[in-house]
Amino acid sequence: MKEIILIRHGKPQSAHNNKLSAGEFTNWVRQYNQSPLDSAHYPNEKRRFATHHIIASPLKRAQLSASYYMGEPAVEVIPELKEMDIPYYRLPLRLKAWHWVLLNRLMWICGKTGRFESFIEAKNRVGKAAHALEKKAEQHTQIVVFGHGMSNRYIRVFLAKRGWEITEKNNGYWGVTRLIKN
C-alpha cells in the first residue's frame, strides 16, 4: 500500500487579521510569504512519520514546518508544490486581511487576472505536483509532504480522481491529510 501524507505548514508570525487597504494587503501578502513560524501556534502533538520520505514546497513556511515537525529538513523540494498565489487587486476598500484573501481568491477563481499566475495556470501546476507525488510514491511507498492550504486541497482532488482514497482530512495549520492507494 502507498501512502501520501499532506501537512499544511504552521501558522506564520505575520498571519494577523487587521483591517487593511489594498496597498497594505499587498504588503501583508509579501510578509506572509517571508514570515517565520509563530512558535505560540506549534502543534500540541506531532505524529510519527519517521519512515516517510520528506518532501516540501520551496516556500519558507513549508521548509520551516518540515524541519520543526520532522526534526530534520526535507530530503526533497518540489517547486510545483508552492502555494497557489494569493492574488491582490487594487480596490477602494478597507477589509480584514483574511477577507481580502477570500475576496481576491474568489475574483481570481472567476478569471480575473493580474501580475501573478492565473487560476488555470495554478491548477495546472498543482496537477503536475500531484503527478510528481504519485511517481515519488512508487519509489518511496510512504511520503510526507509539507505544503500549503489551497495547493493541498487541489492535490487531494487530483489524487482522489486517480484512485487515491482520502482517509483523513484537515486543512488547518499543521493539518494532516492522509491518502492511500493499493
Image (cartoon, helix red, strand yellow):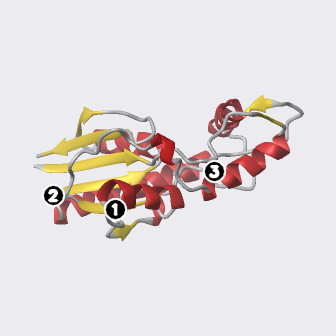
Where disc 3 sits, the SS reads helix
Where disc 2 sits, the SS reads loop
Label 3 vs 2, first from the N-terminus: 3
From the image, state whether disc 1 or disc 2 is nearer to you. 1
Q: Is the residue marked by circle 3 packed among few (<14), some (14-19), or many (20+) residues within 10 Å?
A: many
Determine whether, in the image, residue 28 is placed left or right of residue 78.
right
Residue to which mark 3 is pinned: 32
Give the label on residue 27, or none: none
Residue to which mark 1 is pinned: 55
Above or below, 57 against 8 in this view is below
Give the label on residue 141, or none: 2
Task: Give, as a three-letter code, the residue at label 2.
Answer: Thr
| Res 30 → quadrant | bottom right
Task: Give, as a three-letter code, the residue at label 1.
Answer: Ile
Above or below, 82 against 108 in this view is below
Q: Position of residue 170 (x, y in %)?
A: 36, 33
The residue at the point 45 percent across, 59 percent down is: 64
The residue at the point 82 percent across, 41 percent down is: 22
Q: Is the residue marked by circle 2 packed among few (<14), some (14-19), or many (20+) residues within 10 Å?
A: some
Label 1 vs 2, first from the N-terminus: 1
